[in-house]
Image: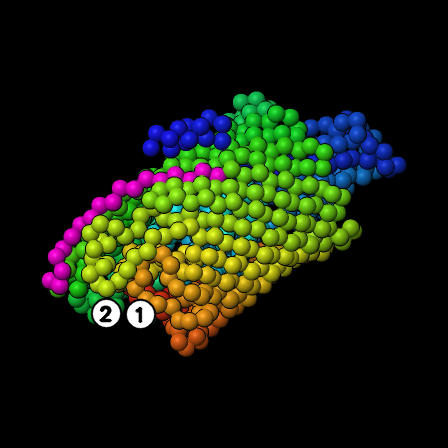
Amino acid sequence: MRRIFSFVLFCAATLSATIFGSVRGIIHDPQHRPVQGAMVMLKAKSSDWSANTYTDANGEFNFNAVALGEYSAVVANPGFNQVIQSVVVQSGTQPVLHFQLSVAVTDETVNVSAAATNVAPSDSATPITLVNRADVARTPGAARTNSLAIITNYVPGAYLTHDQLHVRGGHQVSWLVDGVPVPNTNIASNVGPQFDPKDIDYMEIQRGSYDADYGDRTYGVFNVVPRTGFERNNEAELVASLGNFYQTNDQLSLGSHTQRFAYYASVNANRSNLGLETPVAQVIHDAESGYGGFGSLIFNANPSNQLRLVSSLRRDFYQVPNTPEQQAADISDGEHEADAFVNFSWVHTFNSKALLTVSPFYHYNRAKFDGGPNDSPISTIDDHASNYAGGQVNLNATFGRNNLQAGIYGFAQHDNQLFGLVFNDQSNPNFRDRELVSGSLQSFFLDDKFKLTHWLTLMAGIRPTYFSSSISENAISPRFGAALTVPRLHWVFRAFYGHYYQAPPLITASGPLLQFVSSQSLGFIPLHGERDEEHQFGVSIPFRGWSIDADNFKTLAHNFFDHNNVANSNIFFPLTIDEAVIRGWELTLRSPRIAHRAQVHLAYSNQIAQAQGAINGGLTDFSPPAGLFLLDHDQRHTLNVGADIDLPGRSYASTNVSYASGFTNGDPPPDHLPQHTTFDLSLGKDFGERFAASVNALNLANRHLLTDNSVTFGGFHWNNPREIYVEVRYRFHF
């Protein structure tokens, strides 16, 4: 244990991913000569954040440590017209802008160039979806506290089934806040997200082809830039809603900034009588409630040093929904969840070519399932709490044609689980078992992007990982990629090949629980980490402000993580299957503002999720069929199409149509449940600068049918019935 925490302290003192990129460029005069001493201002589109610099003798400029998001770059120089260009910064990228100045005439003009708008990064092999706080506010249902619509509506192959988020056919994803990972090795232990979507400024969703510094969660990386206070000047906002099923989602937030300091804080509360997916068409015993808080502090000590602090706290309660028979039997099961994290980052800029980010962190997570006293034949309690303490360091250096990322990431973990069974049928003696388990994970990463020419970037990285708990494992994960830019068209073709290692949960079955498992003629095999191999290629196409992205991927998983539950509960025994093969095509589309009023988005996935082989880890209470078989969350086609339209009178309409072809319907036969389509609508209006209101309708047609027959909370699952709620926003100064 001393060795583990020595490693943690080392991480905190020295320290994988980041929210930062850089913006570089060159400025020429009409004769294509470099312009020295031109002033360049980089201005955030969604806040008051800005930075200034001047070009050097070669006409070049650089902004380092730029948080991901949307910006405007403005160039001003005496004797020339002012020029403005838009640019999107993604984490770990270095967009390069080129400005061609024109000589000013009598009346000064401003030239607006869209050359960099919606242009895919030419130094990344990763397909990325970027959403912002305006998307959260306007997308129907996305601003609700426990909503994941901002992911499922915009990310291809992302959907909810048995109350869990799945992306690209898998379970495990990484959440990063301010570029710092929020570690969680437990599979499907929590239902709700870790923080309120209203606290998001930007979210960058990566789908495979990760650089070595982005870790090993194969199926998705959600990198969140929270609100910071730079978007406010001593301003507060109150958000309140009220709708059917007695639902409400409320938040009070405030923030402000100076040139050196910014802060943002919020508190929220929510409740509804419609929480989890229901096992029957009726909504019975399905209330949920929760509250939380969020805070962000940024302090610019000097031009070379920035300090960032992010903290969050959430508590949620879910009733486990009943069937009419269970309700008549007075079944009353519930799930209590808690989550808290604090991340601190020191961002140090050595010079225009070197950036260091040091980030210690702490994360606490708890999921407690309480079986009711009338459960038959068994009432179960499962109280599982995890503590994580660790850190990461990321050093980014640019030299010559190379962009180098290097660093370490690690944490110590301590789990405390109480598991109990009460046999109301007297078939076995009651028992309670407490497990205290510790473990650790350490990774080193090295990643380089080499710009062979201005149109071709080669990428290579490696990530060795060491995991230690009841078992110890080592993994070395190499990654290779390339991005080729077609001149003039700015099409970017990309290709990737890489490996990932995902460490197993610490706690499985042991002690009295293992004895009970054995008494039921079941078996338990120790869990080992999932090892994945990914192949991916794709293309990003910008066209007159439109952004089109298509990609093809294939993931080969060994020791594929899945889970099996205890009765109608959220108590999951993790298990692993010999092999899984997940492959698919994806397409995303995003438009500019059409006629300055409308913007459309599309996310489509054609995906097959299959497995083969035996259960080689965890609870072996069943034997899979021979050969390839469909995983229970296989769904061939998913499509989301939406639009955001500005209407006269400072009003708007936002829509989303979601189509899904249906999950598997048991095996055998390997067919699928019926397809289903839902239509969501939001209508809103601003009344002056302070007051806004909207009406939101989810599943407006009230299509209500069985979507998933895998057994978790309450048994089978139906999609939610129609929900209608009114939301009001009031902004004020303090």
Residue 643 lies, with reference to residue 93, above or below; the image says below
Give the numbered dot on residue 29. Answer: none
Residue 560 lies, with reference to residue 734, above or below; the image says below
Residue at point 21% right, 63% down?
A: 520
Question: Residue 26 at what x, y percent from top left?
Answer: 76, 35
**Mark 1 → mark 2, Cα distance in angstroms:** 8 Å
Residue placed under numbered mark 1 in the picture: 280
Question: SS of the residue at dot 2?
Answer: helix
Question: Residue 362 at what x, y percent from top left?
Answer: 39, 35
Residue placed under numbered mark 2 in the picture: 324
Pointer 1 with pointer 2, Cβ within 8 A: yes
Residue at point 49% right, 27% down?
A: 14
Toward the viewer: 474 or 219? 474
Question: SS of the residue at dot 1?
Answer: loop
Residue at point 39% right, 43% down?
A: 472
Rendering colour mode: rainbow
Residue 138 lies, with reference to residue 105, above or below; the image says below
